[in-house]
Image: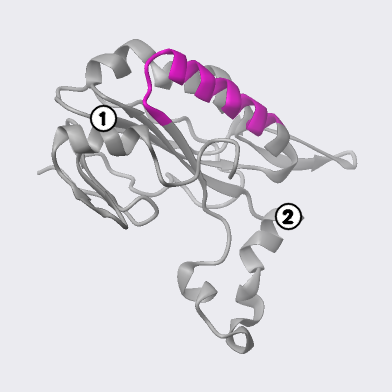
Amino acid sequence: MPTIPFSPERRAMMIKAGATSAGALLASTGFLPSARAAEPEELAVSGPVTFYAEMRVAQPFKPGFDAAMQRFAQAMLQRGALAITLKQMVGDSTMVKNYPESYKGVLRSAYADAAQAGTLPLFYALFVRFDSARVLDVARPDEMFDTVLLPHLHGAILQHGKMVKSPAPMAVYRSVFQTVAAGDRHGIYTGEADILKFFAHPADTAVGTA
């Protein structure tokens, strides 16, 4: 039975293409796991699809990651993607943001402080939107991810007084989803034309502003 993950950041419901895959979260916890990225499943779907990835970035290597993400986004748009969205997940939760100041305490900036201190990596969610599986196949985002982004996803190790890359990249989760419904503050969209319009004009954070 296919799973239907729900994304609170984008308020979009997506149904998994192909066989159900384990690992809705990253494959491992901790800062320096040694794991290879999972390959997306074969597609046999119609309508709009999304290449989705969850990844971690060590703070010392963020400038290189930012530049690589720009190259990745530009290449995907040139190859037919409708939109590329990058969401930085580290920071106060919505619940904490709504607390009175006197109640926040250490939760006010704990996660952001840890990322800045280098004890916690930054967490990102990447959405690459396509109008069909055929266009996604031609764009080959998985291959470009390996070539352009993966080299910047290593953990940081202190060696001889400076931060260097870990031997292997940190764990990455990625797959392809067929979008069957999407929504924002203006409404819920279930028709293909409305979903494509939603994809082409995303309301969430675009690459380069996260």
Instruction: Give the residues in magenta.
Output: 64-83
Provide residue 3's location: percent of width, then percent of height: 18, 46
Closer to the eye: label 2 or 1: 1
Figure quadrant of the C terminus: top right
Work out whether residue 23 or residue 192 is closer to the camera in this orientation and state it: 192
The answer to which image quadrant residue 38 occupies is top left
Q: Position of residue 99 (x, y in %)?
A: 52, 82
Q: Which mark is residue 49?
A: 1
Residue to which mark 2 is pinned: 116
Q: Is residue 90 magenta?
A: no
Instruction: Please say whether residue 57 is visible from this viewpoint.
Output: yes
Q: CA distance from mark 2 to mark 1?
A: 34 Å
Left or right for 149, reference 204: right
Q: Which label belongs to residue 83? A: none
Residue at the limit of the structure toward the left, as seen here: 1
Residue 74 lies in the magenta stretch: yes
- What residue lies at 41% left-to-right and 46% top-to-bottom? 203
In the rendered structure, which amino acid carries the disc numbered 1? Val
Total number of numbered discs in the rendering? 2
Q: Amino acid at mark 2?
A: Gln
Residue lying furthest top in this view? 138
Label 2 element class: helix
**Position of residue 6 in the picture relative to residue 167 (left or right):** left
Task: Answer yes or no: is residue 178 visible.
Answer: no
Going by the picture, which residue comes out furthest to the front? Answer: 186
Q: Give the SS element for disc 1.
A: strand
- Crowd around label 1: few <14 · some 14–19 · many ≥20 (10 Å): many
Q: By what rule are the colours in the image chosen?
A: one colour
